[in-house]
Amino acid sequence: MRMRWIQQCLFGLLLALPLHAQSRSAGVSGTSRGTLTVMSMPVECEVRIAAHDKQWIKKSSEQYTFNNLPAGEYEVSGRYVGRVVDIKVTIKPGQSQTVFLNFLAKDLSEIPAQSPAQDALKQLSSAQTYWEQQNLAKAWDAIQEARTLYTDDPEIQDVYSKINTERNRRINALWTSLERARRVKDRQVMLTSLSKLQKISPNHPGAQQVSREEGITFNSLDMMMLRIKAGRFAMGCSQTLEELNKLGGNQLKLYENETPVHSVTISQPYLISATPVTRGQFAQFIEQSGYVTEAQRGGFVAGLSERNMHRVKGLSWDAPGFEQSDEHPVVCVTYNDANAFCQWLGKLENTVYHLPTEAQWEYAARGGTREMFWWGQQIDKDKPQANLSDHALYLWKKDNFTRRQRDVKWDDGFAFTSPVASFLANPWGMHDMLGNVSEWCRDWFAPYSATHITDPQGPAQGKDRVVRGGSWYDTPVTSRVSHRGGQRGNRAFTNIGFRIVREMR
C-alpha cells in the first residue's frame, strides 16, 4: 500500500538517526529552555507530555513541536487507535530534541489483549490477506469490521476505499452478466453470476428478486438451494449390458444393481444444494456445535494408500491427506456425520434438512436427461466435464494405479478434489453430481423393483447406505448417473462427501 510504503520509508530514515536526535535550536526562549518535536508513524495521532499537558493534542501533520520547555526529564505519550506509546526524553537548555513514535508494531502482542486496537489491527491484517488471496467477500467483511471500530483511521480508510471500489465494479459486472443471461435464457451463466453476487452482496435487491422468481434460496451458510419441481422419471440404467461393457471390463454386477428401469414419481417439490457441502461450511458446523466426527474419534476412514482405497489412520475432514481450501467439498465424513450436520443446520434455521433420498438424488442429477451422463453418452477427452480419475492422479502415484485407472487418458486438472462448481452444471443447475466426490444418500441399499413407485424411501433397514455419483477416484463406468453403490454408515472415505435437501413448507 502506498501510505504504508511512505510510512516505512520515513521510519527507515529515522532509524538511521539517534532516537532523540539533537538538532539546531529553534523557538527557544532563553538559555534555560528547549524545544521538543514529535514525529510518528502513522502521521495522524494524539500526543501529550504527561507533566505538561492534561489533554491530548491532535497531531495531523508530519511533526508537532512543543516550544519553550524548561530543561529537564519528560515523558512523551502518543495515542493511536487506542494504543499508547511512552518515551522518556531529556531536554537540555537551549537545545531541540526530536522523538519518533511507532504505532505500527509487527507484534500484536504488544497491544493489550482486550484493546479495541487489537481487533482493528487484526481485521485490517485479515482484509489485506484476503485481498491478496482475491477473496473479495471476506476482505469486505474484514475491512467493514475494522472501519466500524475506527472510522477515522487513515490506513483503514485507504484499504476500505480500494476494496469498496473493486467490490462495486464486481457487483456491476455480475449484475450485468446475470441480466444478460436471463434474457438469452442461459441458466448456467445466470446461476453462476447469482451465486457470486450473493457472496459479495447478499442484500442486492435485484439478485433477491431474481432468486424469488427462479425458486432459488440461500441458507444461513450461503448455500445455493435450487428448487426441483415435482415430476416423473425413469430411474435406473436404460443402457444395455453391451453398452456398459464398452466402457471397459465385464459390468454385469453394475448392470444388475441398476436394473430394472422403473418409473418413479416425485410428488412434492424440494430444495437441494447446488453443490456438495464444502469444507468451509462443514467447519462452521464443527466450530459452532463442538461436534467431533467419527474419524476423529478413531473410527474407520479410508484413503488412497499404496494401491486402491485402504484404511489410513489419522485422516479426518480437516486433514484428508491432500491439500484443500474452504471451497473444496468436505470428505472423510460418515453418513452419521452428514446426518448430524443436517440436524444442526435444521435446528439453527428452524426447518428440516436431510440427505437426499436416492430417487431425489438421481432425479436432480439427470436434470431431465436419459443418457449415461447428463451431458451425453461419453466423456470428452479434450474437455472433461467432471473431476474423475485422470492423468493428474496417475502422475501423483503412477506405480499404485489399478489397471483400469491406467487406461485413463484425459486430464481434468485435479488429482484429488477440486473447488465445488469448477465444472459446468447440468441443465437444472446442479454441480458435481458426477465427479469430484461421491455422495451419501438417505436410503439403505437394496435391489430395485420393477413396479412404479411414488417418493421411494428405500427399505426400513439394511447393511449399507446408498452412495451415488462418481469422484476424483472413479472412472467413467462408475460415474454414470444411474450407477449406485453402498457403504457402511459409520465409515468415512477421502472420496465421499454429501449434499443436502431442505423440505419446502
Image (tube, rainbow, N blue to C red):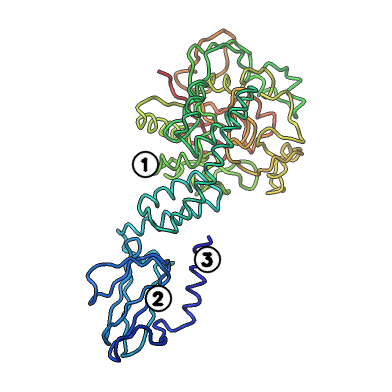
In the image, what residue type sits under mark 1? Gln
For label 2, the residue is: 100
Label located before the other in sequence (3 or 2): 3
Q: Which mark is residue 410?
A: none
Q: Secondary structure at mark 2?
A: strand
Residue 478 image position (x, y, % from top left): 66, 29
Q: Which mark is residue 288?
A: 1
Does residue 427 appear to the left or right of 59 in the view shown?
right
Quarter of the image with the C terminus is: top left
| Quarter of the figure with residue 461 | top left
> In the rendered structure, are the residues bearing label 3 and label 2 in contact, judged by CB atoms less than 8 Å apart?
no
Mark 3 or mark 1, whichever is nearer to me = 3
Spatial CA span between label 3 and label 1: 39 Å
Label located before the other in sequence (3 or 1): 3
Residue 306 image position (x, y, % from top left): 64, 48
Residue 171 image position (x, y, % from top left): 54, 38
For label 3, the residue is: 5
